[in-house]
């Protein structure tokens, strides 16, 4: 009787396999590009950068890099994994061609960035229309979360500087549209800043919000149906006044720093004025209460602003701050939403924490580092990262159902995109035969069927 040695079966490897496609599940991204019309929009936008007699279309080159980033790449050279599968991705430009395009776009500065952003905005409008009830504006409300992210630099890149966390790199300010509990989120702005950029710089928050609003369908670029959420970095007079300015009328929910004045008023709030905080399921949140401050603290702030404070028992081992009171962690935020219970508003603001999930997804999708040296080049790279994140948000929104819609990029790659397949050519048709034993083959097939039912772009 023979006994196997080791934990894994032993296999013999040969390098003469034919008609085998790796990363076959990434056809989901290719079909998403086709059905949303992203390829046409980007190609049209970048037409001015196509040189006479050029073989490769600049829009296709940029999208190839974005797809490579969506599949886990973190530099321009990772487009090679698409070049190895022409049956799925078509003709892919060489590394020098890709680099020359990035340099040309970087040299054009804001003109090239605006062209790419306009194409993304145009396609986003179509995607939300195709998504129907799964779209982030299904309830006629759009929530945009602003948050900063530190990107560490391992070399002396342009504008890299010491950060407030004692690291070295850049400090981009990002904005994401929240898809709610049934989905993930999609990027709508990324402002590249030096590592020493301030967290509560009002000018940067205004610029990022302008970029984010330009990405939304026109009816959401002003008005109460658009909610801007930030942490305490956005709690400045200048930024809040800009949001509430006449003619803009945006809704906001911004964190506020607990100042000494706020701290003194919190100590004077009677016990009867505190309301129990709630969870997403409507149940009372244990050990947390909220109250509204209506005193001279609001003098000088925009009309209609409400200041809400929250106290909660800290987690075991948490260190209290000087602004905390009676052993309770004190936080506050401001909003201009009227006629709604403060517990409901506090829950809405607390859900801003989903932005951390979006940042984690961005770090695993090209934002772990900025691979290029010059700031102008890295601004183009940020646009590529956003296109990749758009695809990773749009594909589940249009094609996946249930818990699969909540999968983050790493899980999408491991379960769907890395699926192997056999390429079969019959007549003029090319057929990918997905591995039958793969547990998520059915998920891929069903998703492709849903995409096929969508109308083609005009």
Image (spheres, grey):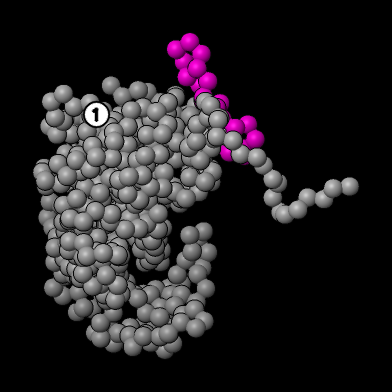
Q: Is residue 139 visible?
A: no
Image point 37% across, 34% down: which residue?
83
Tell me the quadrant of the picture where the C terminus can be found. Answer: top left
Q: Is residue 184 magenta?
A: no
Image point 33% across, 28% down: which residue?
91
Name the secondary structure under disc 1: loop
Image point 16% across, 23% down: which residue?
53
Judge by depth and name the residue closer to the eye, 128 or 295. 128
Q: Which residues are magenta?
A: 422-440
Residue 214 x %, y %? 19, 45
Residue 46 relative to residue 18: left or right:
left
Name the residue that disc number 1 marks: 56
Residue 130: which quarter of the image?
Answer: top left
Residue 231 x %, y %? 30, 67
Instruction: Tell me if residue 302 comes above or below residue 269 in the rendering.
Output: above
Q: Is residue 438 magenta?
A: yes
Judge by depth and name the residue closer to the eye, 92 or 387. 92
């Amino acid at each position: 009787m023979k006994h196997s040695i080791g934990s894994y079966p032993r296999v013999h490897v040969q390098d003469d396999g034919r008609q085998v496609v790796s990363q076959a599940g990434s056809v989901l991204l290719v079909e998403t590009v086709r059905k949303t019309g992203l390829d046409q929009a980007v190609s049209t936008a970048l037409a001015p950068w196509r040189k006479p007699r050029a073989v490769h279309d600049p829009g296709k080159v940029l999208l190839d890099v974005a797809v490579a980033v969506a599949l886990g790449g973190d530099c321009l050279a990772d487009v090679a994994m698409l070049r190895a599968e022409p049956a799925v991705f078509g003709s892919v430009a060489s590394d020098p061609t890709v680099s020359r395009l990035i340099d040309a776009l970087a040299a054009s500065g804001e003109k090239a960035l605006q062209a790419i952003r306009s194409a993304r905005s145009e396609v986003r409008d179509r995607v939300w229309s195709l998504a129907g009830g799964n779209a982030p504006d299904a309830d006629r409300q759009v929530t945009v979360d602003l948050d900063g992210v530190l990107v560490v630099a391992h070399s002396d890149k342009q504008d890299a500087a010491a950060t407030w966390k004692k690291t070295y790199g850049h400090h981009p300010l990002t904005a994401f549209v929240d898809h709610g509990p049934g989905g993930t989120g999609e990027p709508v702005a990324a402002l590249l800043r030096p590592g020493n950029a301030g967290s509560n710089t009002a000018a940067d928050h205004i610029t990022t919000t302008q970029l984010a609003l330009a990405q939304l369908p026109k009816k959401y670029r002003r008005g109460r149906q658009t909610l801007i959420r930030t942490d305490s970095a956005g709690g400045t007079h200048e930024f809040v006044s800009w949001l509430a300015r006449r003619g803009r009328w945006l809704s906001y929910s911004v964190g506020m720093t607990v100042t000494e004045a706020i701290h003194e008023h919190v100590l004077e709030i009677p016990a009867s004025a505190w309301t129990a905080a709630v969870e997403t399921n409507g149940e009372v949140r244990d050990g947390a209460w909220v109250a509204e401050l209506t005193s001279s603290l609001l003098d000088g702030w925009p009309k209609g602003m409400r200041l809400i404070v929250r106290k909660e028992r800290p987690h075991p081992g948490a260190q209290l701050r000087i602004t905390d009171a009676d052993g309770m962690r004190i936080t506050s935020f401001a909003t201009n939403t009227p006629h709604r219970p403060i517990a409901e508003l506090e829950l809405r603001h607390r859900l801003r924490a989903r932005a951390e999930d979006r940042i984690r997804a961005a770090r695993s999708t090209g934002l772990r580092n900025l691979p290029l040296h010059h700031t102008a080049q890295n601004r183009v790279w940020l646009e590529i990262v956003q296109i990749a994140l758009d695809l990773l948000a749009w594909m589940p929104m249009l094609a996946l159902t249930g818990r699969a819609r909540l999968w983050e990029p790493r899980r999408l790659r491991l379960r769907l995109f890395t699926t192997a397949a056999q390429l079969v050519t019959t007549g003029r048709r090319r057929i990918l035969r997905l591995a039958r034993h793969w547990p998520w083959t059915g998920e891929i097939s069903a998703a492709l069927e849903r995409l096929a039912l969508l109308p083609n772009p005009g």
